[in-house]
Amino acid sequence: MKTYSIIYALLALVVFGCSKSGDSELIEEIEKEETFFNADYVLLQEGNGVLSAQLLKSNESSIAKSPAESTFANVPVSDVLFAKQSIFASFTTLTDCTGKVTIHDFNDDTSVIVNVFDDMLECNVTVTGITVEGERLYISYMLEETSKINTYFVRVIDFTSMETSFVDIELAKKPLQMVFTNNRLFVLTIDLEITDEFSLSVIDGTSSMVINEIGLGYDVEQIFADTDQNLIISYQELHTVLNSNTMGVQYIGYEEGKEPLFHGSEFNCFDDQGRLFYKRPNEDGEQSNIPAIYDFANNLAILYFYENFLTASQLEFEYKIGDTTMVSYDDINNIMIVGYQKMDNENKGGLLRIQLEPTPKLLDNLDLDAVPRQLFYQN
């Protein structure tokens, strides 16, 4: 483990998170007293290779773009993104050696830009993941020493002051993904040299030391934390629940043909019951993905086919729904919010608000000039 010093820059920013909405407020003066849905959504959307933020407001009968503007600075689409609660972060490559991480917090509308790898003079760095926890930024990366030799690290950066230190933690295998939960950083790795098997490196959040190595076998798809701070290790045919404190494991298998298929979902969103809202692959329909909910307690997936709450005319002609791009949840109002791409324009999309109880029912639709990727709630 190596320790260094760096300098980083502060800018103005915005924040959002996939979480609960706050107390309901009236969003406009009206003569007749009505009950309104809490309306301050922040939508992360993609258009022409750029991610931007769109503020939204809504009431019980409609959702619309807000005239207010976010200070969120547009960033290029990247494979290295992070979102949790009100925090969104992205990595941008600047040179073979350098890059920057932009961290946005929608709670206080502030932004931090952290320049990374400025300490390296000649190198070939590949960043594989970023995670933000409190005032620490974790970056997993691969350093190409020669054409045949690579070394692997997790860099821990404390960005609480203008000049601070960072620590490099060396790993034996290539890091693919990171999840911070219960004061521990879990790093999914793969052995590219010999076995092609996956493993889990567990790093203590206080000491920044590797405290455990766990073999996971083959075909791991992704890892993420549930609402109990346990780690979900996802395979196509099963998932493992790893207790983040005791390291005890529970294996959950699926019936053939009833696999929930949440292994490819990104920006996972949970309700207060611990149910996962996600986009599920759909092999038999027009859409490649459809909205779904997975109930971990009962090992049950609920699929929301568009035909069950939209007419054929709405689906094909009025809204022109191509593919599902995000699924979120407003647990104050018990509404599922589905983002989709237009079938006739890959750079445009829309949002559907779906009432879940007692049966799925369309509340409204909002057309957008970009494709929804994730929804957060301003507190």
Image: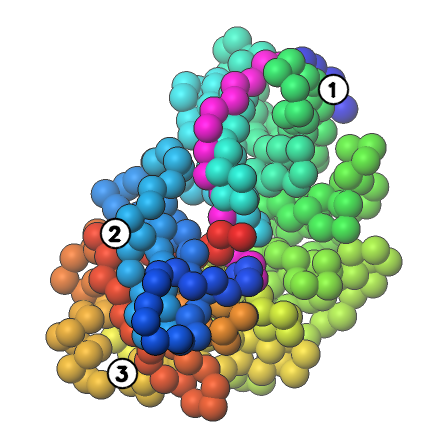
Residue 272 is inside the magenta segment: no
Q: Which mark is residue 94?
A: none
Q: Which mark is residue 2?
A: 1
Left/right placement of residue 200 relative to residue 357 reads: right
Q: Position of residue 131 (x, y in %)?
A: 60, 40
- Identify the residue at the far right of this view: 246
* Residue span colored magenta: 6-20
Q: Which mark is residue 370?
A: 2
Estimate how packed mark 3 is, as few (under 14), some (14 to 19) or many (20 or more) residues with alpha carbons within 10 Å.
some
Give the CA separation, mark 1 to mark 3.
57 Å
Identify which amino acid the numbered label 1 is placed on.
Lys
Residue mark closest to the camera, 2 vs 1: 2
Task: Give the residue at x 55% y 63%.
Answer: 23
* SS at badge 1: strand
- Identify the residue at the far front of this view: 31
Residue mark closest to the camera, 1 vs 3: 3
Identify which amino acid the numbered label 3 is placed on.
Leu
Q: Earlier in the sequence, mark 2 or mark 1?
A: 1
**In the rendered structure, are the residues bearing label 3 and label 2 in contact, judged by CB atoms less than 8 Å apart?**
no
Q: Which mark is residue 310?
A: 3
Give the CA separation, mark 2 to mark 1.
43 Å
One can see residue 292 in this view: yes
Task: Give the residue at x 52% y 22%.
Answer: 10
